[in-house]
Image: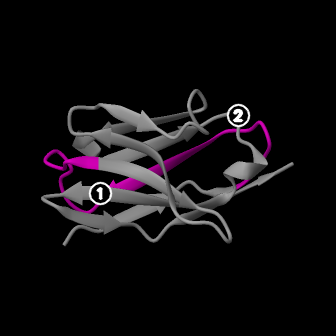
Amino acid sequence: QMQLAESGGGLVQAGGSLRLSCAASGSISSTNAMGWYRQAPGKQREMVARITSGATTTYADSVKGRFTISRDNAKNTVYLQMNSLKPEDTAIYYCLLQLWGINYWGKGTLITVSS
């Protein structure tokens, strides 16, 4: 059973930056993919960024050019660098790990972007 722990959320002003971290309880080197999703109040959870085992990245159109996902297999951690934050980025951000057909989710971390 893989466990994920997100950190790095908080309150930031529009235009600011934050970096989220997601630490896995086990090795991520064999994972199919890891990603970040978010859910804003009253909205469905949506994919923000995804990175495969081969380091191929995918981004939601709304964050392209502002967010960067990366992974450090040695630290069993995936990161999300978020720049030029906007109020519409306010949401709970969840880490996802996909391993052998099973999805593992973190508990989420809240990001609030003030205007």
User: In the figure, 113 relative to 40: above or below?
Assistant: above
Tell me what residue is drawn at x 29 percent, y 57 percent. 97
Magenta residue span: 11-33
Residue 114 in percent (x, y) is at 82, 52
Give the camera-side residue of 114 and 65.
65
Q: Is residue 82 left or right of residue 98?
A: right
Give the camera-side residue of 39 and 20.
39
Residue 14 in percent (x, y) is at 80, 42
Dot 1 falls on a residue whose secondary structure is strand
Do the numbered discs 2 and 1 sit on residues whose CB atoms are within 8 Å?
Answer: no
- Give the alpha-carbon distance from disc 2 to disc 1, as whole Å: 26 Å
Q: Is residue 40 left or right of residue 101?
A: right
User: In this view, which residue lies farthest toward the top?
Assistant: 65
Q: Residues within 10 Å of mark 2 (few under 14, many from 20)?
A: some
Q: Residues within 10 Å of mark 1 (few under 14, many from 20)?
A: many
Tell me what residue is drawn at x 38 percent, y 43 percent. 50
For the N terminus, the quadrant is bottom left
Q: Can see residue 76? A: no
- Mark 2 belongs to which amino acid? Ser
Queried whether the magenta region covers residue 31, the answer comes back as yes
Q: Can see residue 70? A: yes
User: In the figure, 40 relative to 114: above or below?
Assistant: below
Q: Is residue 20 left or right of residue 54?
A: right
Q: What residue is shown with label 1?
A: 97
Tell me what residue is drawn at x 29 percent, y 68 percent. 3
Queried whether the magenta region covers residue 22, the answer comes back as yes
Residue 74 in percent (x, y) is at 23, 41
Residue 39 in percent (x, y) is at 58, 63
Q: What residue is shown with label 2?
A: 84
Question: Tag count in the figure?
Answer: 2
